[in-house]
Image (cartoon, rainbow, N blue to C red):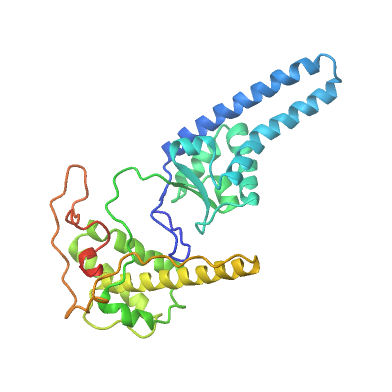
Amino acid sequence: MAELVSGEAVALDLRVARLASRGCALLVDLLIQMTLFGIVTNVIGPIAAVADPAWVAGLTLLSLVAVVVGYPCVMETATRGHTLGKMLLGLRVVSDDGGPVRFRQTLLRALAGFLEFWTFLAIPALIASLCSSRGKRLGDVFAGTIVIQERASGPAHFGPIAVMPPGLAGWASRLELSGVSDGLAMTARQYIARFWELLPEVRDELGDRIVAEVAAVISPPPPPGWRPELVLSAVLAERRTREERRLAAQRAYLRRLRGLPPEPPAAPPWAPAGGPPPPPPRPPAPPPFSDPGPGQPRFLPPQHYPAGPYRDVLGGR
């Protein structure tokens, strides 16, 4: 899982692209580039018969640079991280912080790619990717980018992770969260996402350790007796809600500057009858594990748990 953090208001369930898929995307892009260069060469051919040889050589060099460097640079900038090969394989280039790539980054990747793929036959890229824990080639290292897998390779077992437990909503609304770093939030989120894949003893020990790190940088401290995954879910949900409010206020301010009418209020995702659900009398115990299916992890939630740990409890049902 890539450490892609954007204020917890952006989906982060994106995996680092595997070497095989990147290689297939590269072959597609190289084929497209060679086809484009062949077309350009056929256009320049008749001109070479009547034009000055130096002028033809310069035009050929310019065409080569436009195809080899310009194609990936323009495509990744215009499509926010895609080339035709990456689109076909479901890959995307993003910044190390999870944001979209900028022109400077795509240009650095394209220039490094000329040396890696066209000059040294992809050997430096292969060595760098094998030595990097996130599969980065030299162009990614220089540009501060990472290639991720946009399309999941299998069925998704989890939906939204950060859901507010009703019994912790009041505590979470008073939290001081400025000390929660993006890295710590990402650690908590990955723990919740992998909650059902961990052995129970490992799961509880790791959860207690992460909660201790979170409790050291927030105020007030978590109420006693609550399981760690519920506390972490409350912190992440509150962090996401505040980020969404900040972004909404920013959008409203920009609309006022442009003289546009305010956006209509969004409907709440769910509205329980009779007001908010009462807090549970005590923190619920984790539900039982189901038997794994063929090729699935050992510990999986029952089928009626569509997303996250304790979805029935967190949703107030």
> Residue 219: where, in percent of width, then height?
39, 84
Vertical placement of residue 11 versus 209, above or below: above
Residue in the image at 65% along x and 45% along y: 107
The answer to whether residue 58 is above or below residue 100 is: above
Q: Tell me which corner region of the image, top left, top right, bottom left or bottom right, holds residue 179.
A: bottom left
Q: Residue at x 85, y 15 (%)?
A: 50
- Foreground pick, 94 / 260: 260
- Taking the image as drawn, is residue 170 in sight? yes
Specify whether residue 208 is in view: no
In the displayed orientation, state which residue is furthest to the right.
52
Quadrant placement of the C terminus: bottom left
Report which quarter residue 180 is drawn in: bottom left
Number of disc labels = 0
Query: Where is residue 128 drawn, in percent x and y?
Result: 51, 44
Q: Nearer the viewer, residue 69 or 249?
A: 249
> Residue placed farthest to the bottom in the image?
220
Q: Residue at x 65, y 42 (%)?
A: 111
Q: How far across and how far down the image is residue 130, in percent?
A: 45, 43
Q: Is residue 195 left or right of residue 217?
A: left
Q: Quadrant of residue 186?
A: bottom left
Along the horizontal axis of the image, is 164 left or right of 266? left
Find residue 30 and report its horizontal and vertical position in percent: 56, 30
Does 51 appear above or below 239? above
Classify residue 69 as left or right of residue 147: right
Relative to 34, 317 lies left or right: left
